[in-house]
Image (cartoon, rainbow, N blue to C red):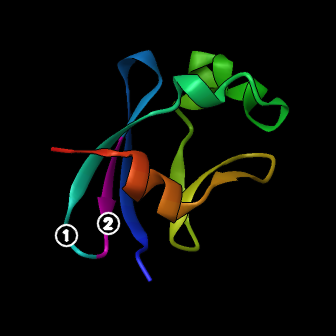
């Protein structure tokens, strides 16, 4: 099972994600911001609070996204 080990929020709602395999991928959150669970992330200050917890990217308020989604949809860097 792939897990996230590090995340860096980037401009334009991007995430630079490092995985347990050592791979790094850029993930674009913009297509997900229209979903109700992710609406708070439209605030750039709130989006910047991204961190790693339990092997995936999380934000305050129990907001998270599956590590598999981050890996599959992410672009290798």
Look at mark 2 in the image and give the residue it sits on.
19
Question: Along the line of sight, which residue is nearer the eye, 58 or 27?
Answer: 27
Residue 29, above or below 63 = above
The location of residue 76, given as percent across then percent down, is 20, 47
Q: Could you say which quadrant of the image residue 36 lies in?
A: top right
Residue visible at 73% across and 22% down? Answer: 34
Numbered circle sitting on residue 31 = none
Give left or right: position of 47 versus 39. Answer: left
Residue 25, above or below 14 = below
Does 43 appear in magenta?
Answer: no
Give left or right: position of 37 versus 27. Answer: right
Look at mark 1 in the image and give the residue it sits on.
22
Residue 6, above or below 29 = below
Q: Could you say which quadrant of the image residue 28 lies in?
A: top left
Crowding at mark 1 (Cα within 10 Å: few <14, some 14-19, many 20+) = few
Q: Which residue is the extreme one toward the left? A: 77
Residue visible at 35% across and 45% down? Answer: 74
Please identify the dominant SS of the magenta region: strand
Give left or right: position of 4 versus 22. Answer: right
| Quadrant where the image shows the C terminus | top left
The location of residue 46, given as percent across then percent down, is 64, 28
Residue visible at 19% across and 69% down? Answer: 22
| Quadrant where the image shows the N terminus | bottom left
Question: Are dots 1 and 2 in contact, CB under 8 Å?
Answer: yes
* Residue interval drawn in magenta: 16-20
Disc 1 element: loop
Residue visible at 51% across and 72% down? Answer: 55
């Amino acid at each position: 099972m792939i897990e996230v080990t590090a995340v860096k929020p980037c401009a334009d709602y991007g995430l630079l994600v490092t995985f347990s395999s050592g791979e790094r991928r850029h993930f674009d959150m913009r297509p997900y911001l229209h979903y109700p669970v992710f609406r708070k992330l439209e605030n750039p200050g709130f989006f910047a609070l991204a961190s790693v917890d339990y092997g995936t990217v999380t934000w305050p308020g129990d907001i998270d996204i599956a590590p598999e989604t981050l890996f599959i949809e992410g672009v290798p860097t």
